[in-house]
Image (spheres, grey):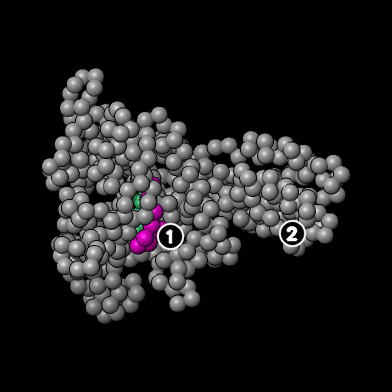
Amino acid sequence: MTLEELVSYAKRYGFVYPGSEIYGGLANSWDLGPLGALLSDNIKKAWFKKFVDEKVNCVRLDSPIILNSRVWEASGHLSSFNDPKVDCLECHNRERADKLVEKASNGTIDADGMSLAEIDQYIKENHVKCPVCGKENWTNARTFSLMFKTSQGVVEDSSSAVYLRPETAQGIYIAFKNVYRTARAKVPFGIGQCGKAFRNEITPGDFLFRVREFEQLEMEFFCKPGTEEFYFEDYKKYCVEFLKSLGIKEENLKLYDHPKEKLAFYSKGTTDILFKYPWGYDELWGIASRTDYDLNKHQEYSKEDLTYLDPETNQKYIPYVVEPSVGVGRLFMAFLLNSYENEQLESGDTREVLHIHPYLAPYKVAVLPLIKKLHHDKAMEVFSEVSKEFNAVFDETQQIGKRYRRQDAIGTPFCVTIDDDTMNTGIVTVRNRDTMLQDKVEIKELRNYLRSKLEF
Ligand code: ATP
């Protein structure tokens, strides 16, 4: 599936629309439509289930988007959450300078962490041209802050300046003490959070891949210094397993270890899980081993004691942190790209089908009366029954074959048809999206039947 095909598919079926469309749009902002909102919700549910709820030592947090601005001073975001940019003096196109270098080198250079002078030198020496106008007349590279600034309260002065969070992680660090005390948590333990983050990206694009407003799923896992390597390796495997258990094909994934010499001084390692997007393998999920850097910084700036007292050894220390962090939008794209197929049928026809994991499918079941006039009421009874437990859709327009095709295309794993047989015997036909085979199931058994097939 190309990127254009994905965007058009997502709009056609109501997964994603351009944001503010009736006003001419707002670049790189997107609405999640009825199906997109469900898919996104299911992705988050799956993450919480596997990263928090099924873990004996992990809990949730929901912290605000706007935090005390001192948080961003302490974390270093105000001084250094920047990307380098260059502007084309001919056509005024703006590029993220590190990405420009990476593209110009065909991916052979990792420009993350290159100094501005090194970037300028590379661009000059290699005669890097503007991808828009083809000329070679760049400004020097300059840093550009990705922080979204606004003000809080009635007076607009420097004391009212606040920022939209560029990541959810800092909200977790600053609540660390409250959480570990109230949850009576013992190291090692994790705090997971899902929420919006905002980055004033220089070059947003590629659909949901790089946007200025996005959702993150972040886990901060606090462990005893010396054990971080174990948890770092463990989370790498766990994240890959999570993706595979939701149907992501092995060949669509790759791991990229950031070279040690490029890591920040406090970092013990960063590995990205890359997914094969239409333009090539690119970052889906980042897993970082961050030592005690963040908690230390917050202890220093807040003057609060953020040490942990080990109840067994009576030792006091600041825990180390392993952080797997992923964007919901990048997962959303990965699941659609990975599952979409234009399937060639034996009959010679083709069908559009989304082989998405049933747990993620927007609708779990479609309820379809074979003939509207005869079967509507019974079908409504079935819909009322199944919708108590599963996201269900009711459709009685068009002939049955076309209705099946529509459900295949949006990934509904089961279609339940109500016909004359149902009226006489209480038995419905359940059609499987992937095999197209049909089972006969009694209405009173239907919820049990579906539940057993939808487990994750
Ligand atoms: P990139 O190098 O692509 O800019 P990053 O390394 O800065 O990403 P992190 O700060 O590690 O990203 O953020 C964690 C995760 O959040 C990323 O792996 C990605 O899934 C998601 N993410 C980051 N920036 C964006 C964005 N602008 N739009 C959508 N998702 C994003």
Number of numbered tags placed on the structure image: 2
* Mark 1, residue position: 208
Residue at figure coordinates x 48%, y 47% from the top left = 43
Query: Does mark 1 have its CB less than 8 Å from ligand 1?
Result: yes
Could you tell me residue 308's position as x and y percent?
21, 30
Quarter location, residue 225: top left
Per the model, the C-alpha gap separating discs 1 and 2 is 33 Å
Local SS, label 2:
loop
Q: Where's the C terminus, which quadrant? A: top right
Does residue 355 appear to the left or right of 60 in the view shown?
Answer: right
Residue at figure coordinates x 36%, y 60% from the top left = 213
Does 451 sit above or below residue 423? above
Could you tell me residue 113's position as x and y percent?
21, 53
Q: Where's the N terminus, which quadrant? A: bottom right
Does 379 sit above or below residue 210? above
Does residue 292 appear to the left or right of 451 in the view shown?
Answer: left
Local SS, label 1:
loop
Does residue 404 appear to the left or right of 175 in the view shown?
Answer: right
Could you tell me residue 140's position as x and y percent?
18, 69
Q: Are marks 1 and 2 in contact (CB under 8 Å)?
A: no
Segment tinted magenta in the rendering: 209-217
Q: Amino acid at mark 2?
A: Glu
Question: Mark 2 Cα within 10 Å, few/some/many (few <14, many 20+)?
Answer: some
Could you tell me residue 321's position as x and y percent?
26, 37
Nearer-N-terminus badge (1/2): 1
Residue at figure coordinates x 19%, y 36% from the top left = 306
Q: Amino acid at mark 1?
A: Leu
Question: Mark 1 Cα within 10 Å, few/some/many (few <14, many 20+)?
Answer: many
Residue furthest to the top in view is: 312
Residue 396: which numbered mark, if any? 2
Does 309 sit above or below residue 415? above
